[in-house]
Image (cartoon, helix red, strand yellow):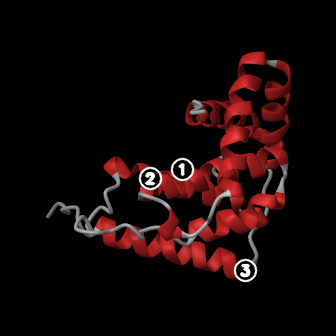
């Protein structure tokens, strides 16, 4: 089942983030999306709105499918497939506080740039979509990562971004 999870995730996170912004929690990880204060309204909306609950059921189904599969970079057909799996599982992990996804997400967060091929300057990331998904996945999964997983994810994303950004011309 293909669910509109990105619309669900983006809408819920943005609305909860904006609602929680005045009293935003501070901690070790400066979350850009799902803060502890934002989780309650997200969970409440999923529980109270049948449409959102239905969409979330599709997200859960997709996340469980990714969890049951492989988390090796080479087992995915594209960078988009990897980043989508990482973001989907990270979203469910954050909303449900379900650490079962942590190992798989951590493995996938070490994959940015795996499919660079002949398009190394942008890794085939149309408008940065995959890099954006990796960023959201990292943001949501970071509280569940150990130091080694965190370092591997950050290194992979920073290396991929450095190569990607060199492809763009800088004004004189």
Residue pushed farthest left?
A: 172
Taking the image as shown, residue 84 lies to the left or right of residue 170, namely right
Residue 109 figure quarter: bottom right
Q: Quadrant of the N terminus?
A: top right
Q: CA–CA distance between discs 1 and 2?
A: 6 Å
Residue 11 figure quarter: top right
Q: Which mark is residue 8?
A: none
Spot occupied by residue 74 in the image (x, y as percentages of width and height)? 48, 69
Spot occupied by residue 104 in the image (x, y as percentages of width and height)? 68, 65
Q: CA–CA distance between discs 2 and 3?
A: 26 Å
Where is 52 relative to 13, above or below?
above
Of label 1 and label 3, which has the lower sequence position?
1
Of label 2 and label 3, which has the lower sequence position?
2
Where is 46 relative to 148, above or below?
above
- Residue appearing at x 79%, y 62% in the figure: 27
> Do we see residue 154 in this rendering?
yes
Spot occupied by residue 89 in the image (x, y as percentages of width and height)? 68, 52
Q: Are marks 1 and 2 in contact (CB under 8 Å)?
A: yes
- Residue appearing at x 76%, y 52% in the figure: 93
Q: CA–CA distance between discs 1 and 3?
A: 23 Å
Identify residue for label 2: 80
Q: Residues within 10 Å of mark 2 (few under 14, many from 20)?
A: many
Which callout, 1 or 3, points to the residue nearer the camera?
Answer: 1
> Do we see residue 31 in this rendering?
no
Identify residue for label 1: 84
Residue pushed farthest bottom?
A: 148
- Residue appearing at x 81%, y 31% in the figure: 41
Spot occupied by residue 148 in the image (x, y as percentages of width and height)? 69, 82
Identify residue for label 3: 147
Where is 171 relative to 62, above or below?
below
């Amino acid at each position: 089942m293909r669910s509109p999870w990105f619309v669900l995730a983006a809408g819920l996170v943005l609305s909860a983030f904006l609602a929680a912004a005045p009293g935003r929690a501070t901690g070790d990880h400066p979350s850009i999306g799902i803060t502890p204060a934002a989780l309650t309204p997200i969970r409440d909306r999923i529980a109270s709105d049948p449409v959102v609950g239905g969409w979330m059921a599709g997200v859960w189904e997709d996340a469980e499918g990714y969890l049951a599969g492989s988390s090796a970079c080479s087992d995915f057909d594209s960078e988009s497939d990897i980043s989508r799996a990482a973001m989907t599982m990270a979203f469910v992990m954050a909303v449900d506080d379900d650490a079962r996804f942590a190992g798989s997400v951590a493995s996938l967060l070490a994959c940015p740039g795996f499919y660079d091929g002949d398009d190394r300057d942008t890794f085939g990331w149309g408008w940065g979509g995959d890099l954006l998904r990796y960023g959201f996945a990292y943001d949501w999964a970071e509280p569940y990562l150990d130091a080694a997983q965190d370092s591997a994810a950050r290194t992979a994303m920073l290396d991929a971004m450095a190569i990607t950004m060199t492809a763009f011309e800088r004004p004189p």
